[in-house]
Amino acid sequence: MPYIIRKANRNDIPQLGKLLESYMQETYHGAWGGNTQLLEQHLVDNELKIIVAETLNRKAVGFVAWITSYDLHWCVKGGDIIDFFVCPPHRGHGAAMLLIAKLAADIQEHGGAYLKGGAVDNPVVRRLYQKIAMCLPDGESYVSGRAFRRLSKLSSKSLREIIKNLPESAWNYEP
């Protein structure tokens, strides 16, 4: 299934609100505690960045939200994934992989050299992270070094090319 992957803007806020409701219900079995007015303000003020996956008819079906971060141990900028969600009917069709590749490119565009994500309770996403990331016992996952650069270069490629050229997890240990 083809998807459009792009940076979110204020016009996406109503659909993002619905996605956040679904995400919170599925993940935490409760309602989203935020509101679309604050989300819009924070997005416009660049306090967070969101990348959306949408169908060709412009229906948002997934997102990855992130903020810039800094690794003081290595003195490099990067990005932290806040939340990552794809609607159940669109899982397994490549939207998540396209979002991750675009995320790496966006982080690199902002001067970053790594991405970091937290613990995931989804076995499919966990397998993806284990394939491309350095996964720590506490659930944190990092894509950095050669693996990060490869992933960011793949953002402009087709899903087939991305999957065929994914970085190896060992590349995270290479500069």
Image (tube, helix red, strand yellow):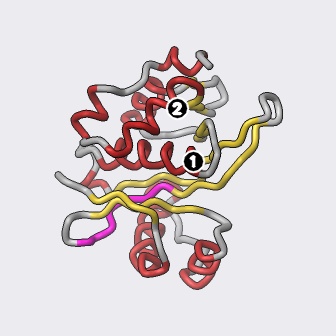
Task: State the residue in front, 150 or 71.
Answer: 150
Task: State the residue in front, 155 or 36.
Answer: 155
* Vertical position of residue 31 compared to residue 156: above or below: below
For numbered disc 1, what is the local secondary structure? Answer: helix
Residue shown at the point (44%, 71%) measured from the top left: 16
Give the mark nearest the N terminus, 2 or 1.
1
Q: Is residue 135 left or right of residue 8?
A: right
Q: Please state the horizontal and vertical placement of residue 47, each as a whole percent of the image.
A: 67, 67
For numbered disc 2, what is the local secondary structure? Answer: helix
Q: Which residue is mark 2?
A: 148
Residue shown at the point (59%, 54%) measured from the top left: 66
Q: CA distance from mark 2 to mark 1?
A: 10 Å
- Assess whether residue 62 is covered by the magenta stretch: yes
Residue shown at the point (79%, 34%) measured from the top left: 75
Q: Is residue 92 left or right of residue 121?
A: left
* Vertical position of residue 20 compared to residue 168: above or below: below
Mark 1 neighbour density, 10 Å: few (under 14) some (14–19) many (20 or more)? many
Q: Which residue is mark 1?
A: 107
Mark 2 neighbour density, 10 Å: few (under 14) some (14–19) many (20 or more)? many
Query: What amino acid type should be assigned to the residue bearing mark 2?
Result: Phe
Name the residue furthest bottom.
37
Q: Which image quadrant: the C terminus?
A: top right
Task: State the residue in front, 157 or 27.
Answer: 157
- Assess whether residue 2 is covered by the magenta stretch: no
Extent of the magenta region: 58-64
Q: Please state the horizontal and vertical placement of residue 12, each as a whole percent of the image.
A: 42, 76
Q: Please state the horizontal and vertical placement of residue 65, each as a whole percent of the image.
A: 54, 58
Q: Main secondary structure of the magenta part?
A: strand
Residue shown at the point (40%, 28%) measured from the top left: 127
